[in-house]
Amino acid sequence: HQYLKRGDPGNYRPVSLTSVPGKLVETIVKNKIVKHVEEHNLLDKSQHGFCKGKSCLTNLLEFFEGVNKHADKGDPVDIVYLDFQKAFDKVPHQRLLCKLHGHGIRGKVLSWIENWLKDRKQRVGINGKFSDWRGVTSGVPQGSVLGPILFNLFINDLEKGVSSEVVKFADDTKLFRIVKTEADCEGLQKFLTKLSDWATKWQMKFNVDKCKVMHIGKNNPNYTYSMMGANLATTNQERDLGVIVDSSLKTSTQCAAVVKKANRMLGIIRKGIEN
């Protein structure tokens, strides 16, 4: 199929297909968790994914407002785009339960979630042939009702104790900081090291090859950052939640992409009418 990415099995993710009664129970549990989280203001304000009153738009607005606030003053800024490797699939169940307990989710609700996660199995089927069943000890089921809120709580303390500005949409994480001096750059590097330590502690992993750095400003030191022992690649252009961001912070590239897409759609419509 033209939309499938061939070659690398890592491009594919399992999707959980649950029954309607199962989804109803998940919704009841989710609503109870969300109510608890909102009443105690537990979710970090940097998270915009699957949160009431927040969206991709609020994520981008907060990000651009923060970066432009510094750039308009002529201050150099470094942006780091982070990429979790199979984020939802990597979440270890026991550590997730530990995090939920730490957020005050206990008793029957926590026991229900534990039972919901355990004894899961999966296998792969291709052309009528199937692999052996394998136990699943990590991952919040993608396609489930509970998955997003559980993941948000799991990574809720990701940026705890750091000075850089962070904006998240579920696992899509970016951070930025003014870098007037080498000391500023070293401060950002210390944060990246803390993130690496966090990932190791909680059995998560960053896809370092896909983590990118964007240097903003004429007087930017162009510092080389690293994670997990590997240098991060620099980029002048990045697609962020569907919007093209470039190092000039201008919208011309995004506008050109939208026009190209619109013209392509008009061409398809025109052909449909002619036929």
Image (spheres, helix red, strand yellow):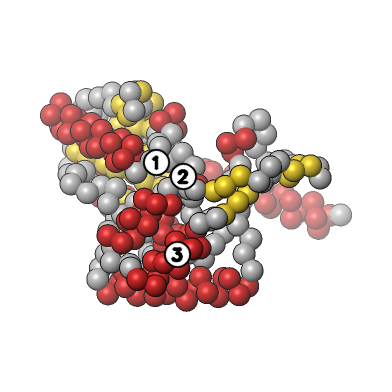
Find residue 185 and report its horizontal and vertical position in percent. Answer: 19, 30
User: Which one is earlier in the sequence, the residue at label 1 or at label 3?
Assistant: 3
The residue type indicated by label 2 comes to: Lys
Q: Are marks 2 and 1 in contact (CB under 8 Å)?
A: yes
Q: Do the residues bearing badges 3 and 2 touch, measured as CB atoms within 8 Å?
A: no
Which image quadrant is residue 84 in?
A: top left
Residue at the spot of label 1: 204
Q: Which residue carries the number 2 mark?
A: 90
Q: Mark 3 against mark 2, which lies toward the viewer?
A: 3
> Which class describes the residues within 10 Å of circle 3: few (<14), some (14-19), or many (20+)?
some
Task: Give the answer, above or below, for where 223 lies relative to 65.
Answer: above
* Crowding at mark 2 (Cα within 10 Å: few <14, some 14-19, many 20+): some
Is residue 249 or residue 100 the one in the foreground?
100
> Which kind of residue does numbered mark 3 sit on?
Ile
Q: How far apart are the alpha carbons under marks 2 and 1?
A: 6 Å
In this orientation, which residue lies closer to the viewer: 119 or 226?
119
In the rendered view, does 218 fall on the left or right side of 22? left
- Amino acid, disc 1: Met
Badge number at residue 113 = 3
Q: Is residue 112 left or right of residue 63?
A: right
Q: Nearer the viewer, residue 254 or 10?
A: 10
> Going 40% across and 37% down the picture, which residue do you hit?
205
Residue 1 higher or lower than 189, as above or below:
below
Asked whether residue 68 appears in the rendered view, the answer is no
Return the x and y of residue 187 as percentages of the image width and height. 17, 34
**Secondary structure of the residue carrying numbered label 2:** helix
